[in-house]
Every structure is written in C-alpha cells, then in structure tokens.
Amino acid sequence: MPDRQIRIYRFFEFGSLASLMMLDTRVVGRDQQTNSPVTARDRNRSLLGDDQQAWLFDQLELSQSRGAQWHLIGQQVMLAPLTLGGLPDMPNLDLGGGAQVNYDQWDGYETSRRALLGRIEAMGLNNTVVLTGDIHSSWAMDLSLDPGNAFVYDRFTGSGSLGVEFVTPAVTSPAAPTKGLSDIAKAYLIPANPHLKWLDLFNRGYMVLDITAEHCQADWFHLETVAEPSNQERFAIAWFTASGENHIQARHTPSQPKRNAPPLAPVSNEPEEAMA
Amino acid sequence: MSTDRRTFLRQLLIGGASVSTLAACGGESTLNNENLQLPKVNQPTNPASPETPGTETPEPEKPVESLSFIAIGDMGTGNIGQYRVAEAMRQIIRDQGCDFVLGAGDNIYEDGVTSVDDNGFLESFEYPYQNLDVPFYMCLGNHDCASTIFGGGSDNQRGDYQVDYHYSDQRYSTKWHMPERYYQQSFGKLAEERPFLDLFVVDSNPLTSFYQDYDKRFSWKDYGYPQQLWMKHKVAESKAHWKIAMTHVPYLSNGKHGNAGDLDQGMRMLFTSPDADGLRYKLFLEEAFGNNVDMLVTGHDHLLQWLKPTESMGPAHIIVSGAAGKTDKFQDPDRNPVYFQAENELGFVWVNLTEERMQVEFYLVDESTGDFRLAYSRDETKPVSATEPAPA
C-alpha cells in the first residue's frame, strides 16, 4: 500500500511570470477508481481530497493576487473530458457530458473537475495552463466546464474556454501499436470532442514549454524510434495560448531557443567530480 | 443577568439607535469602517442617540458580558402563523431578554418586493412584529429574489429594495436592518477594539438559485466570488470574541433542500442553474467560516434543527431555523446527526451568549392556539476556543 501521508503537492513561484502548482492526483486524496458513469458523478467522490483542493484554491488565489502572468498546474491525469461524443452537461440530472471512456482521469471525478473549473470561472482567472502526462500520448485541448454545449463553448473560436491543457507523451512507455490506429482515433475523437484540437497516440517524445509574457507555447518533439539508441527527433507541432485568450491555436514553428540560456550540464564520466 | 444590565443592553442595542450608540461606545461598527452612509434614522435627530444629553446615556466603559438573540427564518407570510410566532417571541423577549433578532431570509413571501414602499414590508414584517421592540438583522432568501411564487431566485435585483428599506426615512419602524446585501455587524464590546460578537450575513441566493439569473451583476464571477473573498477576509480579520454567520440556504439540513453540494436532490432535475446543487456554495461556506465561526444560522428548510458540528466546517454549531412562518416535514431525519430537530411545527430559536458559554433553546408554537413550549434547551461551551487578545 502506498503511504497516503507523504505530501508531494507543492508550489513554485517564477517571479511575476508564472506560478507552478504541482498536484497529487494519484495517492493522497484520491477515492477508489470506478468504471461506472453513475459513480463518476457521485458528489462524495474526490480526486484531490478536501485538504489538497483547499490548498490548490488558496494557491490560485495567491497566484492571482500576486499578479503572476501564468498559472501552471502540473498533474498526472487528463483534466479535459475524453468522450465518444460530446453532449451538453446536465449537472442537475447528474447526466450528460457525453460517453466518457477513461475514468482513471478527471472524468471519473466529475465533482472535483466542476469544483476546479468552476473556481477558475468564478475567479475570472486568466492564463491557466494545465500540464499533464501519464497517458503515453500527445494532446492539446481547451478547458471548458461544458465543452459539448455550444452555448457555453464555441469549438471554432475557442470562446468560452477557461484555460488550456497540454499533455506530454511517454518517453519510452508503450503507446498505440501502429500509426494507423493513432490516425483513426484522431479522425474520430477530434470531431467527437469539441475542445480537443490535436492528438497523437503513436509517437514517443517530449514537450518543451516556452513561457513569455505574451504566450505559453508547447512544442512537441517526437522520436523516430525508442527501440534502439538514436538521436533522431523531429518537431511535430506547436500549440500556444496567447495571454488573456484562454484557448489554444496551432503554430508550425517551434519557439526560438532561449538567447541567454545557461550552458548544459557537462557530460561527465567522472562521478568523483560531481562529489567534489 | 441583573435587570439593570438587561436594561442597559436594551438601551445599547434596541431599535435604530444601535449603530450610532455602539459607535459612540467605541464598539466597532462595520458601517462606520466602510464609510457607508448611515441610515437616516440613526442621525443625531433621533432622541435615543447619545449625542442628545439625557439620563439614559450608558457608561461607555462598561464591557458587555452577555448577549441574547432570537433566530427566525422563512417567516414573511403575513399569515396567522407568523403572528403566533411573533407573540411567542414577545413573551420570551419580555421574560428572558433579547438584544436583537436574526432573520434568516424569505422575509417577504412569495416573491419579495418590487419597490421600497411595497406593502410587503408592512404585511410581512412591520405588522406581524409591531409589538417587538428589538432590531432585526435580515438576510436575503430565494423568495426575496424571485419573480414567481415558486421562489426560483432568478430575479436577484429585487433584493436591492430590501436594502433600500434599511435607508428609507418613510419606513414604518426602525427595526429593519440590512445595510447591504451581504454585511458584517458588530455587537457589544468585550475590550478595547474587541467586539463581543461579529455577525456575518451572506447573500446566498445568487450562489444557489434554482433558475439562472441572466443579470450579469449576480454571476459567480462578478458577485459570488467577490462576496466569498470579502467574507473570508472579514472573518479572518475579525477580533470579535464570538463569531456567528447567517445565510439562507443551509450548509446541512435534514429537510427537502438538504446539504450544500447536493441541494434539492428530489427537485433539482427541474432547475436550470448549474449551481443549484450548491457545490461552489459549500466551498464558499467552508472557506469563509470553517474553523472560524462559533455558529452558523440558516433557514430555507421549514424546520428547526440543531446539527452536530462536522469535520468540514470545524467546531461551529449549525442551526436551521426556518419555521417562523411555514412548516414542512423531514426528507431524511438521519441524513445528518442532530442534537434536536422538529418537523411540521412553527417555532424559533433563542440563544444566550456569555463569554464562555452558549445556551440554545428551541421553542415550538401551536399555529391554531398560539400556545408555545420550550422543546429543547442545551448549554454548550464556546465552540471556537478564544484567541488570546493581542498584548496592549
């Protein structure tokens, strides 16, 4: 059994540019996973737990009041819904939102998601960027309380979006077995999920985040292979959100390298040097 | 409590004189701090005001050692039931003392008032309570902000008239106190800069209404969250010995409206507001009041309940007093543990606070005969342990 007492959720400040809140969506407050869409909407279930949720809302308030430009939330499971067909959400009927497929992510904890997105909406918080991993694939999405409802969220303009979510792929872990499967999923899931703009289930790689006063941009770099040593990688796509826009747009060039970047750590074969 | 002290407190707090008298005694008044316009009736022309030399001017140094109040809710029917409860209150006030009344919302059924000179103020407030000479601190309920008899709460702007009435010089009496839609009010003085009691009054309807109010002024972004921040900071700043919060929609209740976060289980399917379940409202209450207030007074369910403290709200005792005009039955009497609860009967709650203790008494009133009885009484130590006063 994991030790549920160890606290890994924590907060970092990067001057006035950004705050980073790192969450624990796996252990400390998470209720047992479900496969039932009814249980997923149980109001007593929580993904973060009351303490961590209260802490997160405090940090968001602090980050807003100290005037941070970007509010980054790093966490483990996709916040945006993943459905086989988006439908308007009807919280008063405990129904709607479309047929969700993965209750491991926030889809299995509807009350927690409504609380977080509802708080961002109530705060009028601009420039929330959720950074996610875990799902071994690359995704770029807008965040809306009700993405399947055209009165709440406009899939063509991004109007009504409360923030954005970027998902980084696996470095080496298994993904979709063939590119063809990934393309089929993409062709089906993007129309079915109005807030979902891009996905790639096949390629392994990493994501570079470029944060400036004007934008927060994610560049996806995919590797040719992870089956053998190789330094072949290629830029896949960039998605960015301009400050104050709260929705994503594509860009086909990666961010420029940082001009005064510190030198990379030297490749050292002498461990004793590091000890000195 | 000696008769002298009771007289003193009565003079200190009754009627329209309360605000200026308290301020003159050095008691902290939110109204003064906020530079809000004081009610016209509280200006020095009032004969009870301390500016007028008179024998009744209380000694300013005397600290308050005890306060009593009555909590009522869902009272504004203007029907015989409201008059029966008012008469029972009059007798309790006469026999046991009472410095003020808390009105937990639904002040004027069924759909509030539409102007400051609306007859509703007379029929549902002034006439029923004309024999009571104590100030009423009022809170807005869903029926005060509704445009239909169903109390859907989609017309929040109507609540503004109940604030306007506080400032009206045409009003029938000076009892009605609602200086803002949500506010803080200090009572008495325990020591320098230290009120005996701070009352925090929430405007819950815009946060939980059944139907959506399309007036943007009352959205969560422009109203709910700013109110939440205001409340949280005021409670945190308050140096008062006792802190009590009042709001219309319950935090916990065994009636048909139920618990915040899952309000109106059986009826919610008919509602259009995505906040009708009170998910955000629940967090509002916990963040503003959790582990900070001694008592939370609510209405909305037409019952009387004293709910046991819960972990999520901390040591606060939770009172539902919503039976001063209408009655209803429990939906699930075991939903939340209680010290006391009563259904299908009119009634009210009388509370006495001393520095260390609180005495809470539930009175039930027979609608047909007007007979009333003490149904439950319990003495508790102060829930939130007193913080040490800052060194002088």
Image (spheres, coloured by chain):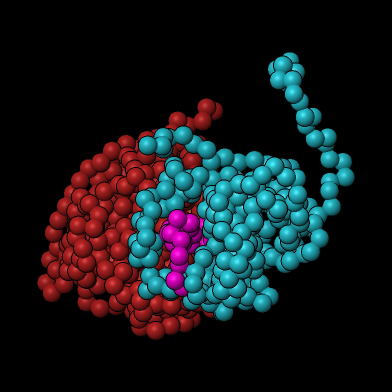
The extreme bottom residue here reads B148
Q: Is residue A246 left or right of residue A8?
A: right
The front one of A10 and B273 is: A10
From the top left corner, tell me how far across and down residue B358 is, in percent. Answer: 28, 43
* Position of B350 relative to A230 (above/below): below
The front one of B150 and A47 is: A47
The extreme front residue here reads A228
Q: Is residue A71 left or right of residue B130?
A: right
Q: Is residue A211 visible?
A: no
Give the quarter of the image for residue A3.
top left
From the top left corner, tell me how far across and down residue A248 is, in percent. Answer: 69, 65
x 25%, y 78%: residue: B79
The front one of B325 and A43 is: A43
From the top left corner, tell me how far across and down residue A144 is, in percent. Answer: 57, 67
The front one of B52 and B113 is: B113
* Chain A drawn colour: cyan
Q: Is residue B216 left or right of residue A208?
A: left
Which is the main secondary structure of the residues drawn in magenta?
Answer: helix
Q: Give the number of marks.
A: 0
**Chain the render paints red:** B
x 34%, y 45%: residue: B311
* Position of A100 relative to B11 (above/below): below
x 70%, y 48%: residue: A18
Q: Does residue A105 show up magenta in the picture? A: yes
Q: In which quadrant of the rendered image does the C terminus of chain B lie? A: top right
Residue range in magenta is A98-120
Q: Is residue A241 left or right of residue B252?
A: right
Q: Is residue B345 visible?
A: yes
